[in-house]
Amino acid sequence: MYEPIRTKSVHSTMAGDPTDFPHRSREEELDIQLASHLAALLAVTDELRAAAPSEDLDVAAERLAGQVARLREGRKPARAAGSATDPRVAALHERAHALAGRALVVAASRADTAAAILAAERMDAHAAAQELTGVG
């Protein structure tokens, strides 16, 4: 009724050597995930810096960029160019708080103290900003 399969499955590791395709360790996967969360947080931080400039956000952006570069073996992250007329500051703080929380979870699971401290500090800063803007 059905035509038989004539080629080996690309998904099967039983047919060939299991080293035929690249594998990443759990540590490498967590590095990638943490770098992604911190890069997303950096993008939101850059948007906030454009909408509501502050020295705290400038310092946080540099620290975030440093952590992303460290996790990506020295490759600098792309930086967002936010619009200075963005009225969504409260929503950006809420989004940044959530991203920092995700980064904190991953940093804790890979025992990255520097990234965990930075993520926790950013969570606190964005939570405080949410209280000031009436969100939270």
Image (tube, rainbow, N blue to C red):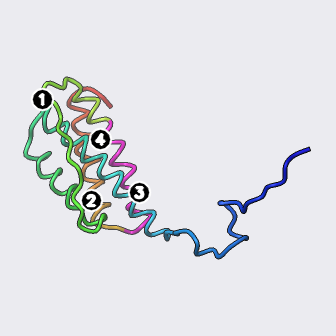
Instruction: Give percent across and percent down for residue 3.
Output: 85, 49
Identified at 20% across, 37% down, the residue is: 47
The residue lying toward the viewer, choosing from 123 and 15, is: 15
- Observer-nearest residue: 121 or 33? 33
Q: Which residue is mark 1?
A: 84
Circles 2 and 4: CB atoms closer than 8 Å: no
In three-dimensional space, the C-alpha distance between marks 2 and 4, rounded to whole angstroms, equals: 16 Å
Q: Nearer the viewer, mark 4 or mark 3?
A: 3
Q: Amino acid at mark 4?
A: Ala
Q: How many angstroms separate mark 2 from mark 1 (CA)?
A: 24 Å
1, 16: nearer the viewer: 1
SS for dot 3: helix
In the displayed structure, does residue 19 sit left or right of residue 73?
Answer: right
- Disc 1 marks a residue whose amino acid type is Ala
> Is 98 colored magenta in this rendering?
yes
Left or right: 68 as drawn, with respect to 84: right
User: Which label sits in the foreground, 4 or 1?
Assistant: 1
The magenta span reads 95-111
| Upstream in sequence: badge 4 or badge 1 | 1
- Amino acid residing under circle 3: Gln
Nearer the camera: disc 2 or disc 4: 2
Q: CA distance from mark 3 to mark 2?
A: 11 Å
Mark 3 or mark 2, which has the lower sequence index?
3
- Residue drawn at (84%, 53%) of the image: 4
Could you tell me which secondary element the residue under label 1 belongs to? Answer: loop
Q: Which residue is mark 4?
A: 96
Q: Can you give x and y, in whole percent of width and height, for residue 5 in the image?
A: 79, 55
